[in-house]
Amino acid sequence: MFLIEFYAENHYASIISFIFTFDFARSGNVLSLNLARAYQRGEKFRVSVNYRGNPQDGGFGAFTFNTHNGAPIIASLSEPYYARLWWPCKDTPVDKADSVQIDLTVPDNLTAVSNGKLESVRSLSGWKTFSWKTRYPITTYLVSVAVSNYAEFGETFTFLDGTRMPLVHYVYPERLGDAQFQLADTPDMLEFFNRAFGDYPFKKEKYGHAQFAWGGGMEHQTITSLGGFSDGLVSHELAHQWFGDLITMKSWQDIWLNEGFASYGEALFVEDRFDKAAYRNYMSRMDHPYSGSVFVRDTTSVGSIFNTTVYHKGAWVLHTLRHVIGDATFFSCCAATSLIRVIALAAPRPMISKISRNKFPARSLAGFSSNGCIAKGVRSCFTDGNKRARN
C-alpha cells in the first residue's frame, strides 16, 4: 500500500482524477493506493494526482495571501507538517523526494519563485508560467512558493573549486535599497559557512532569498523566505541549508538538531567576523533558564515544537560539545557535515559510547548526554570551560 497525505476539508474543493491502474481509497486526510502487485525496493512506478481548491493557512501560515504596499504577496511556509494543506505528498521529514518540479502560473506583472533552478518562463495572454526544478533530495516542508511584484538583484558566487553559482534575492520594490544594504554580507556568510561546514550543499543550483509577509525566516531549500534582513536572521537561515536541509532530523521531536545548529551558526559567524569576545557575548544572550530537554515530547503544535529551548539550549549543547572535544575535532566534524551524526540526538548512551570509542578514544562523551546538556533542568553545561553545569 502507498499512502499520500492530503487535507480533506474545504482547503481543496475536489479531486478531479487519479491516473493509475490500481485502486485507491480516501479516508480523512489520507489517500491509500492499493498497488496492483508487490514492488521491489528501488523499483519505480508513477502516480498522478489532479486536484484543485483554495489552500488555507495553518501553523505559521502554510499558504497565505497577503499584500504589501498594495501589491499581492502569496507564499508558503509549510513547517512542520502543513505541506499537505496545499499539495498531496508524503508529509514527513524522513522521506525525501529525489527531485521536485514546480510550475507556477501568475499574472505577468508578478514573479513566481521556488526551489532549485529556473528552467523556463513562458508568456501567454497576460500570464506567465515560471518552471522551477530542484534535482537534490528535498523534504516536503522545504518546498517553497513565493509570488509578488519582486525586484530582483544578486551576483555570482565562486567556490574554491571554481564552481559559479547564482546568489539572487527577490524583495519588495519599496524595500530594495534596504535589502541591497543589509544582504550585502550574504557572500561573506556563505564563504564562512563553506569553510566551517564544507561547500554549500546545493551549489549546482542557487542560493537566495524571497521576501514574504511573515516576520521571521524559513530555510526553504536554495531559496530562504525572509520577513527581514538582519545578520542574525540571514546567517541562521543560511546555516540551515547544511543542518536542516542537507541533513534533516528524523522526527519533529528532534527539531533541536535543526534549530540548535542554526542558532549556533549565528554565533560562529559573529566569532569569525569579529572575535572571541563577541562570540561569548552572543552566546550569553542565549544563556537563560531553559524549560526542560531539547528533545520535544509534544509535537502537536508549532508552539510546542518551536520553543526557545530547542534554539538556545540547542546552541549551548553545541558550544559545550566544542569545549569537550576541542576546536580541531569539532570543526573537522563540521566540515565533514558529520557532527550531527556524531551527537545524533546526543543520543542514547550506547551510541555515545560507540562514538567515544571510535571517534574520540581519549575522552568519553558519556557525561555529555547524562550531565544535563541533553537532559532537562539545566541552563548551561559549560561556559568556555570555566563554568560547570548549574541547575
Image (cartoon, rainbow, N blue to C red):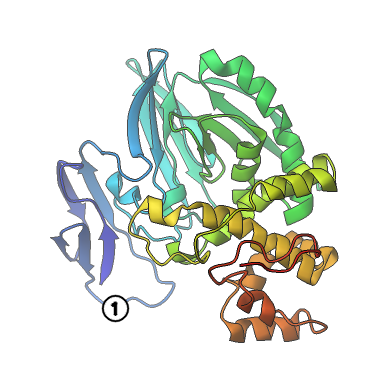
Quarter where residue 320 is shown: bottom right
- Residue 330, position as x, y percentages in the image: 77, 65
Which residue is at the far front? Answer: 391
- Residue 221, position as x, y percentages in the image: 53, 46
In the rendered view, tell whether residue 382 sits above or below residue 357: above
What amino acid type should be assigned to the residue bearing mark 1?
Ala
In the picture, measured across the screen, residue 41 lies left or right of residue 200, that is left
Q: Can see residue 310?
A: yes
Residue beneath disc 1: 38
- Residue 164, position as x, y percentages in the image: 73, 39
Q: Residue at x 55, y 17 (%)?
A: 175
Instruction: Give the tally of numbered discs.
Output: 1
In the picture, measured across the screen, residue 335 lies left or right of residue 366, that is right
Between 161 and 77, which is closer to the camera in this rendering?
77
Quarter where residue 177 is shown: top right
In the picture, measured across the screen, residue 332 lies left or right of residue 61, that is right
Q: Residue at x 45, y 18 (%)?
A: 149
Label 1 packing within 10 angstroms: few (<14), some (14-19), many (20+):
few
Q: Residue at x 43, y 56 (%)?
A: 305
Q: Can see residue 201?
A: no
